[in-house]
Amino acid sequence: MRVGRIASALAAVLLVPAGAGAQSVEAAAGGFVIQRRVEYRSGFYQQSGTCASIAGAVRAGPLRAVWRACSGTLAASGAAPDADVRIQAEVTGLDVAASRLLVLGFRREVRRFESDAGVTVWHLRGGTVRLEPDFGLRGLRGLVDVSVLGTGRVRGGAAFATVLQTAMGASFDPPGGRFGVRLSYRFERYDLPESAAGPRRLEQFTGLAVEATVRLRGR
Amino acid sequence: MTPVARGLVRSSRALAWLLAAASRQPAVAQQQAGAPSPVPLSVQVAVSADTILFPAREALPIVVRPSRPARVVATVSVADDPAAVVWRSDTVASGPLSWDLQGPGASRVGSGRYAIRVSAHDSEGGTASAVLFVVVTALPADTVAPPPPPEMLPETLLVGQTTPWAIPIAFAPIVLPSYLGRRSLNYGRRADRAALVVAATVGIAGYVAFTRGRHLERSSENVRLNAEARALHVRRLAEIREANAAARASAAVRVYLDRSAP
């Protein structure tokens, strides 16, 4: 009974019908202040840096196609095996607004790390769930984004056991304006199990992401 | 006046007296004589000069007086259009006729000017007709004015923020790494300033939104009450419409002779 009630309450909150939604085109630019922590061969390393990003989204009704590219440099703090890594990432995805609050989507990401030691490329694919609850002030919304990229793999290497990307924060789009701002805390976890390609490697990315958005077309 | 002229006047007066007498006792005279009457058939029609009728249960008597026994029929048509016949009586040998003020389709005739024409045909082939004009005026019915539409309650209300989403979202950056991250990677990790910045920003924004924010919310209670009020209004309107139609159908009608008619 209790489970049923909880499920009903959740459904009532999450499945508020999405609006008809017109077409719109949005662009965004921002940065991700990254702290990367790596556990590899029983050692612990930490890198930090900034990744600049640009993004675009086209929305038509409940569908939203997204593209995002990120480029930056991570500098080692301490004796890191991959000192000064240049990182590049490209994300493409398609979202469906299940309700005014809940968005479901698919993500595909290619992340490239380049250092003196060589180039490593990650291919990640999976699903995403995003909640954008209204805080009560016009234009102010919360942001909860959880992506589980279950079919990730290192090119020429092992498959990831766990790929989890989360973002928690808020966005503010002043009413009547075209510009907005998004602030979130990102937490990412990547687990590469021990395999023939190499020993176990665990990584975590955390940091502050700030984005300015502009609506180029539509509402 | 010459004697001849005086004789002619007397003769004509006598003839007129005879004609009048014949018209008073036409059938008897004719039947007793057993010969064609020299007097042409005539007919008179009369209705009440001014009367008020309830068409649902009363009719307008039409008195028809032929000068001698004849079959008579009456028709009622629109005064300005004799071809537009709205009612026709049965052909009767004698006796009063009555118009129930019904027109085509058994509906009551509207207000207007009507011509009542009677025709008489006797057994000898004589015919006569007469016409008079009446004005029919529907008197106002005792009807009820429809009620104004009910006042609707707002179905969308501006209410305060009731779901404090900001609280879990503000806490999430602080606790997420501990719950979702690897303990080994979190070990010795200093306070994450990025997490604190986001938590503080979301927390403050959420607090402001929670205390000051308003959002539109659909009130199912008001929607239900409005639906009930609308249904009640529709029902009431239908009842009033029905009652008014019945009142109009049974409303009195004034019928009076139009003496100005030619």
Image: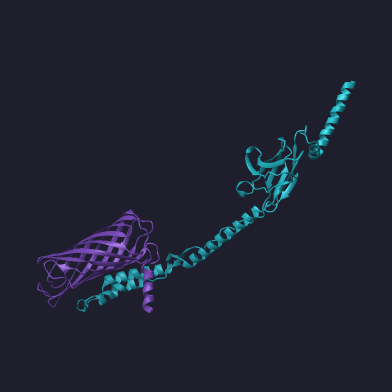
Q: How many tags in the picture?
A: 0
Compared to residue B59, the image places residue B36 above or below, namely above
The residue shown at (46%, 64%) is B158
The residue shown at (29%, 65%) is A104
Compared to residue B132, the image places residue A158 above or below, namely below
Query: Do we see residue B241 in this rendering?
Result: yes
Q: Where residue B105 appears, x then y in whole percent?
A: 60, 48
Q: Which chain is purple in the picture?
A: A
- Colour mode? by chain
Choose between B128 and A56: the one closer to the eye. B128
The residue shown at (62%, 54%) is B245
Residue A63, quarter of the rendered image: bottom left
Choose between B125 and B91: the one closer to the eye. B125
Furthest-top residue in view? Answer: B2
Q: Is residue A181 left or right of residue A35?
A: right
Choose between A190 and B249: the one closer to the eye. B249
Q: Where residue A70 appears, x then y in whole percent?
A: 21, 61
Choose between B196 and A218: the one closer to the eye. A218
Compared to residue B157, the image places residue B121 above or below, namely above
Query: Do we see residue B150 in this rendering?
Result: no
Residue A184, quarter of the rendered image: bottom left
Quadrant of the frame with the C terminus of chain B: top right
Q: Where residue A87 appears, x then y in whole percent?
A: 17, 64
Quadrant of the frame with the N terminus of chain B: top right
Residue B57, quarter of the rendered image: bottom right
Q: Where residue B243 appears, x then y in whole percent?
A: 62, 57
Compared to residue A63, the image places residue A40 above or below, namely below
The residue shown at (59%, 59%) is B239
Q: Which chain is cyan in the picture?
A: B
